[in-house]
């Protein structure tokens, strides 16, 4: 029984995030242009896309961005009669302030959420996996980043920027370990940097390059496993149902390159290629602090402390366009391809990962010292039919995600 119960628990914790750990877009203008923004980055979201863009500010600038991430997913496993659906709203946002010290140097500070996703299933739908019990099933992962920014303008054509990123990670998980509830909550810090370069060979062209270094977030918290009561009775020794634990998760290196072109004064066309080194997420080790838990897990043939991911590197291709109808009004649209880093062998329901085709659109209004932008993106997931392997949860997965957003920028 011991091996079977803990193996089921492990199967349901091997894929805790959607397409990796990162959100796809930040900022309503960038979002509406399909996130093809590395060569533009001329608003307060520069800290996320390309910190060199902060060097374009000629006035003190404050920006606020808010978005709702609304996934709608389903999972069917006909062998056990499971037909589950979920829909949930997660909030994300940014606040940034930038201060040009002179014509060359700009300083800034931003607070934003580059990650924030999860699932919230009806536990009754998964009762066949938990002996008919209605347990909690869901997950939530988020990162809050605090980033000071420095941008330097070498000339009108070459700008460089850097941000230092202090990342506060949070992760909650509820699932079943056999017929018993499993719940954990953890928090922790990690650190990294973003380097950016903008080159403007003419008024019509702009080239951008941005690199985010890997950031290892050291999480710690508490986990509760009700099944420990069974082991207490089995071994005649009181084994606590709660233990502290630590776990290191790495937000991997990301590289974005972009090109934008103005064929006319009113039109911008942009193209980006984004690469993320998800292959660094191979096997994640959880260190349980309780000594009895350590002894219990060491006695099982399976390494219960391991989260097997075997993720693969991904490349996103993004296209964007902005047409300025007047000096005040702009309309925008975009498209990008978002492949999943998760192989079939580690797919599960806690945060299912699909290949997405994404369409985006939005509008913007500028009124002198301020601008108001609205963006929407719709991620259309490609159905995945997963066959059983050692580390996955077989079945049919479907998901679409709607992300509306609004941004406000003020210059003074």
Image (tube, rainbow, N blue to C red):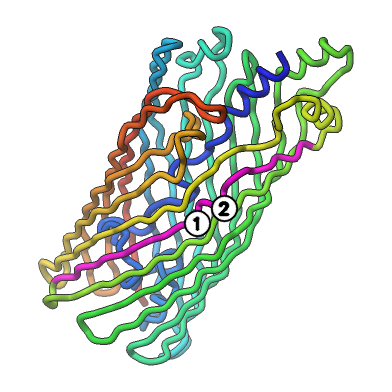
Element class at badge 2: helix
Q: Position of residue 304 (x, y in %)?
A: 70, 31
Residue at the extreme top of the image, as rendered: 132
Q: Position of residue 201 (x, y in %)?
A: 28, 86
| Residue that numbered label 1 is attached to | 277
Q: Main secondary structure of the magenta part?
A: strand
- Residue at image x 66%, y 41%? 186
Asked whether 173 falls inside the magenta stretch, the response is no
Specify whether 130 is left or right of 51: right
Q: CA distance from mark 2 to mark 1?
A: 6 Å
Which quadrant, please, contains the C terminus? bottom left
Q: Which quadrant holds residue 234?
A: top right
The residue at the point 11 percent across, 76 percent down is: 264
Q: Secondary structure at mark 1?
A: loop
The residue pinned by badge 2 equals 280
What range is drawn magenta here? Answer: 267-288
Q: Is residue 281 left or right of residue 46?
A: right
The local crowd at label 2, few if under 14, some if 14 to 19, many if 20 or more residues have their Cα within 10 Å, is some
């Amino acid at each position: 029984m011991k091996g079977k119960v803990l193996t089921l628990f492990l199967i349901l914790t091997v894929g805790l995030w959607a397409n990796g750990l990162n959100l796809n877009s930040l900022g309503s203008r960038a979002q509406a242009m399909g996130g093809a923004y590395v060569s533009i980055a001329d608003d307060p979201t520069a800290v996320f896309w390309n910190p060199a863009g902060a060097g374009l500010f000629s006035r003190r600038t404050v920006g606020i961005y808010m978005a709702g991430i609304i996934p709608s997913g389903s999972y069917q496993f006909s062998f056990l009669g499971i037909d589950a659906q979920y829909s949930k709203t997660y909030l994300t946002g940014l606040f940034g302030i930038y201060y040009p010290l002179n014509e060359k140097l700009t300083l800034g500070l931003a607070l934003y959420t580059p990650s924030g996703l999860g699932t919230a299933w009806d536990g009754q739908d998964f009762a066949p996996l938990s002996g008919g019990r209605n347990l909690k099933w869901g997950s939530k992962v988020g990162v809050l980043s605090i980033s000071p920014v420095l941008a330097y303008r070498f000339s009108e054509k070459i700008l460089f920027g850097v941000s230092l990123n202090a990342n506060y990670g949070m992760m909650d998980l509820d699932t079943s370990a056999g017929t018993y509830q499993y719940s954990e909550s953890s928090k922790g810090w990690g650190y990294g940097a973003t380097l950016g370069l903008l080159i403007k060979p003419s008024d019509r062209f702009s080239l951008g390059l941005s690199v985010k270094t890997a950031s290892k977030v050291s999480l710690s918290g508490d986990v509760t496993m009700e099944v420990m009561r069974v082991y207490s009775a089995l071994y005649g020794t009181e084994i606590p149902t709660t233990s502290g634990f630590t776990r290191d998760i790495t937000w991997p290196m990301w590289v974005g390159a972009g090109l934008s072109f103005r064929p006319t004064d009113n039109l911008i066309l942009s193209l980006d290629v984004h690469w993320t080194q998800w292959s660094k997420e191979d096997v994640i080790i959880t260190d349980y602090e309780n000594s009895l838990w350590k002894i219990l897990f060491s006695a099982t043939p399976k390494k219960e402390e391991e989260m097997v991911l075997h993720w693969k590197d991904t490349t996103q291709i993004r296209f964007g366009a902005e047409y300025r109808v007047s000096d005040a009004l702009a309309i925008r649209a975009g498209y990008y391809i978002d492949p999943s880093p998760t192989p079939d062998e580690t797919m599960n329901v806690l945060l299912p990962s699909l290949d997405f085709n994404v369409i985006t659109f939005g509008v913007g209004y500028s009124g002198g010292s301020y601008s108001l932008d609205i963006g929407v993106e719709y991620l259309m997931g490609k159905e995945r039919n997963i066959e059983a392997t050692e580390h996955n949860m077989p079945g049919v997965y479907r998901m679409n995600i709607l992300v509306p957003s609004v941004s406000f920028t003020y210059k003074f």
